[in-house]
Amino acid sequence: MLEMIDHSYVIVEFFCWEDVLFHGMPKYQTLEESDLILSLGRCVDVYFPSRKRSRISAPFVFTEQLFKKQQTTIDVLPDECLFEILRRVSGGEERSSCASVSKRWLMLLSTIHRNEQKKAQDFDKSGGSLRRCLKGKKATDIRLAAIGVGSGNRGGLGELAIIGNNSSKVTDLGLMTVARGCPSLTSLTLWNLSSIKDEGVTEIAKECHLLEKVEISQCPAISNKSLLAIANNCPNLTSLSIESCSNIGNEGLQAIGKSCPNLKSISIKKCPLVGDQGVVSLMTSASSSLMKLKLQGLTISDMSLAVIGHYGLALTDLGLSDLNPVTEKGFWVMGSGQGLQKLKSIVIANCNGVTDLGLEALGRGCPNLKQISVQKLAFLSDKGIVAFAKVAPSVETVFLEECHSVTQVGVFGLLVNCGNLKTLSLTKCLGIQDLPMSVPSGVSSCNSLKSLSICKCLGFGNFSLALIGRLCHNLQEIELTGLHKITDSGLNSLIKDCESGLTKIDLSGCVNLTDKIVSEISMVHGGSLEVLNLDGCRSITDASVVTVAQNCLTLKELNVSKSAITDFSVAALACAEQLNLQVLSILGCQVSNKSLPFLKKLGETLTGLNIMQCRGVSSLLLVCIRLQMVMGTSSGELGGFVDLDMSEQAQEAFNQLKQALVSAQVLTLPNFEQPFIIECDASCKGIGAVLMQHKRPISFFSKDSSCTLIRKASNSCYNKELGYDFEIHYKPGRTDRTADALSRQAEYGTFNTLCSGPVCLQGAQVIEEAQAGSDHSKIDAQLLQ
């Protein structure tokens, strides 16, 4: 199918098929067999099999003789002779053509070094422009070899990511082929590849001197030897990330720090051999350039944190997680080192050494700190929170998660003492209890706070909300989720004091709220409210939606999922004169087919609609809604839905529409100057693919894959990477109904009756006339029927 595109840009959406594309010379010897081949030129054949069951009248039998390969004279030559021939091939297109002959030629070409080529192709010294990401079983040495050979003539490979699993077959051989063919590589990512060792990474480092970003995760066979090679050959390295690599230790980090003067970001996670020596050497060597540092799950002591506090002169972002050996002394010394003057963001998670004293020292030693996030700190109390707020007046964002020793007093002290606080987030802080508390006279308000988020703090209730309402008058965004203790009265005391107007309110999971508070919200903040989330508020009824439709004229998103609304709410939203709703979610609500005419009217502005788990809506109409959304305009309009009660005339028209959808020729003409999209899928019975442009099909492909002879005759799809520029996007199989249906023709015996004629012949006629430039009037007339 790729052959018909004539080297245009292609976007390929792979599902799970592999050796299914055919290339080059004719594969059939009889007239009946050759009818399935459409010639597009001197060197191009297109294969358009439309189904797994043949429709041709003559018998179509696969034989061993049909697929028997004819051995050519050149295949008799040994590898040494072929090597000498292939290294004299110049030009990217010529090398790609040679690599498409066979896997043997491909692998030989991938072993030829640039110095061994007679006329080596120049590459961009500023880095390549192509990006490749190989996942799972798609990550193989053959595919890497194809990338290495075929990417040079299309701008060069700039970024390569290999994400493996238990079925991945990538070895050092594949990385070596990339190293020889892609000297313009600037970014390398290796995830979960147990078969990759130092040899492959070392070869990458020796050949790809432009490397700037390296990310290695869950590669246990990679050791310090790889980091030494990167340090000695890649002086432009700016970012290094290492995670769960059990053989990487201090020696490699020392080399990186000494030899990479441009290093700006480094992340080290769960590497048991990394200790104080590696961190200290790294910080002392790269103190003037290192801006981002993340350490997680390392066996380091207070010494490392002391060095960070003294030598982190350029640090702007710091992350420390799961550092159990570090004590209170380490955090205190780091904050007192006076070296973190430029630090703007810090994240501390699950570090038992963080106490009130250490947090106060950090606040005092980081005068430009803007954002702090503390998670799972068992020994941090109200005293530390208040002391930090007093010595860090520049802080604008505070995140507290699972800090169970922090109570209502700590939150109150944070609001009072942080004059520039703009965002406050509390998540699962179970120490907060809802106790009555008065605001002392003379206490300044926190008018700078714009966003408040309180999630799953089970003790948070009405008294706490009232306290925040007295202090924070300029709130614009409120997120209160999973708070079972708050009621209408408590929330009312908060929203009444918000003078600037709320734009976003999220009350999901607050089961004790009723229509009364929604009415109050719509009356007070209806002129500014844009997002309202009432998901899981079981006491919310149609009355709330009616008030929202009448007063919230700027509302764009409304979520009333799992509430008590009915069809009346949908009708109220549709009849609102000035409402401009864009996203509506009524998941799990008691709506029925009666709502569909009103959804039709809402479809003029809706870009998102969620009506899942609405048992009152029939399955047939849900399918129609999905079909209408797929066939809607590019602006996202839903278009019209079918009416609930169909007359005989309407039912007849609907049946004619269904028949037209499954019988009319809907293939469009290709535009060879625009990108193509190939959607592919496979089943246990066969494979299917659709060639498209602008969401319109050009040709269909369906093939029974149960015959081993066909699989033997198929050329590898890896060869197609050598002659085309394309991107691979993964989509879940359930989202690709067309290709999935084509792949399952053998399972659904009636599928062939959906087409008025062989689809492959329709595609052949369209492509043939397009290539010949003939009059399209005949086809156009059929398309417009």
Image (spheres, rainbow, N blue to C red):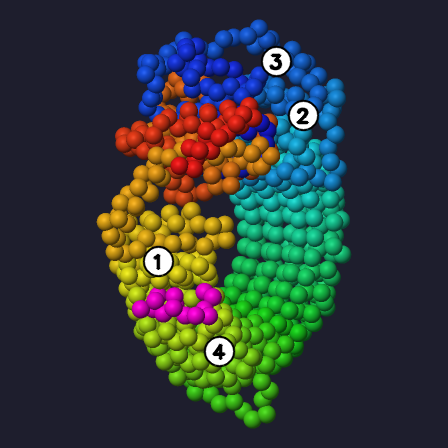
The disc, 1 or 4, on the residue closer to the chain's N-terminal end is: 4
Amino acid type assigned to the residue bearing label 3 in the image? Asp
Bounds of the magenta segment: 568-581
Pinpoint residue 322: horizontal percent, then vertical percent. Answer: 53, 59
Looking at this view, is 382 or 165 the one in front?
Answer: 165
Residue 118 seen in render: yes
Mark 2 or mark 3, which has the lower sequence index?
3
Question: Would residue 628 be found to the left or right of residue 249 on screen?
Answer: left
Q: Secondary structure at mark 3?
A: helix
Observer-side mark, 3 or 4, equals 4
Residue type indicated by callout 4: His
Task: Look at mark 2 in the image and give the residue it sits on.
Answer: 92
Q: Which residue in the structure is indicated by mark 1? A: 611
For residue 668, above or below residue 625: above
Magenta-drawn stretch contains 570: yes
Q: Residue at x 59, y 68 (%)?
A: 372
Whether residue 20 sits left or right of residue 89 in the image: it is left
Is disc 2 placed on a helix, strand or loop? helix
Label 1 secondary element: loop
